Image (cartoon, coloured by chain):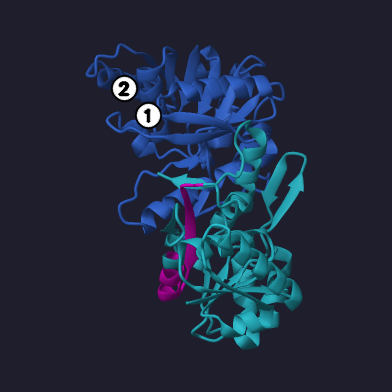
Chain colours: A cyan, B blue
Amino acid sequence: MRIALLGGTGDIGEGLTLRWGRDADHELLVGSRDPERARDRADGYTATLADRGVDADIKGFGNAMAADRADVVVLAVPAYHLVDTVESVADRLDADTVLVTPAVGMTRDDDGFSYNRPGAGSVAALAAEAAPDDVPLVGAFHNLPAGGLADLDGEFDWDTLVFGDDADAKATVADLAAEIEGLRPLDAGGLGNAAGVEAVTPLLINVAAENEGLHDLGVRFE
Amino acid sequence: MRIALLGGTGDIGEGLTLRWGRDADHELLVGSRDPERARDRADGYTATLADRGVDADIKGFGNAMAADRADVVVLAVPAYHLVDTVESVADRLDADTVLVTPAVGMTRDDDGFSYNRPGAGSVAALAAEAAPDDVPLVGAFHNLPAGGLADLDGEFDWDTLVFGDDADAKATVADLAAEIEGLRPLDAGGLGNAAGVEAVTPLLINVAAENEGLHDLGVRFE
């Protein structure tokens, strides 16, 4: 499968690329607004994996080119770039492309981080509005600490909640999640449940900040 | 220590009473608007524990009487009764009483449950507004499945997030939580972080509903 990671030069993009590069067998397309930067990072990820004896298929492209070639397009961009990014690649997407959002909007005050719920209901709902109507949108990979994900020396036992209104697209993403060692996909229902999933991320950051010895926290439902 | 569980005849009250009755050594005061019902339930909990060879100190009272006698008052009532309940016992509370809210407001639609965030910012903020100014309020025990908590045959390995603006009160509640076998208290910061904690409860219900084989879900941060 071809997986594009738009904004794949950033932290969550790095983690997903390295984990899929190591644990699965896909063509990974690192996307960036700057194709040169995308190629540099793709080379870096390839080298990181080669150091571990893994021969991964990772290439860098501009975001539109990466999206054009992919079966699954992960929007690994900050929430405030999400709509722009979807719009910039919209004409490269079709009903056979699965669009994936891990994006979460947060604000910070004296108490810590909190979920900044968009008027549309969720960050995922914003992405769905910006995408062509026939492109299925799935939410996943929200509640993974980027540092822990990108550190290939680290092991984890985390859940990722997968939501969306298209069952086939959701199953595709759940399968991709399950390929990452230590990651368990759980079904969180439809797009209407997105806010509840997105809101967990600032909570994880707060709990890590408030408790000595805890950092790079993920979550496990049991 | 004397712990009052207002609404202690309900499901989360039952679970906390049985667990503290079995795992700790406190005077447990089951409160209800109906004192007779409180006494019946207290006798029932006592009998359940006696069947397991545990001699617990559990008595039933009207809510006000229970609150009056307690060091810690747990508001084990539905969110829509929270303010009424606090107001009904307000003159029985003082600066030495720790008030604890596990309450979460939820709504339900076709997608599942979602967090019904009050205009005050959180359910805990509503309780804080209703309580006398000098009474410390702590949030805890939100994300525990009532059925799993009350089933003494069940074992678990769950976290409970504890928040509040009074460090001593928060420590008191964290210590009480840690006495329950399998429960780990984690600091979630101040009252301003309450919404993030409360919002996890509908998510747990949705995840349990959407995934075969999962039920009575708690959460673990790791």
Q: In this rendering, would A68 be left or right of B207?
A: right
Q: Quadrant of residue A133?
A: bottom right
User: Is B185 situated above or below A18?
Assistant: above
Callout 1: SS: helix
Residue A52, numbered label: none
Residue type beneath disc 2 = Tyr
Left or right position of A202 against A53? right
| Residue A160 location (% of width, % of height) | 49, 56
Q: Secondary structure at mark 2?
A: helix
Pointer 1 residue: B14
Residue A8 visible somewhere in the drawing: no
Q: CA distance from mark 2 to mark 1?
A: 8 Å
Q: Is residue B45 above or below residue A27?
A: above
Residue drawn at point x = 61 percent, y = 18 percent: B93
- Residue occupied by mark 2: B45
Task: Identify the subunit bearing mark 2.
Answer: B
Q: Residues within 10 Å of mark 1 (few under 14, many from 20)?
A: many
Magenta part of the protein: which range? A155-174
Q: Chain of mark 1?
A: B
Residue A161 on the magenta segment: yes
At x 50%, y 61%, the residue is A22
Circles 2 and 1 in contact, beta carbons < 8 Å:
yes
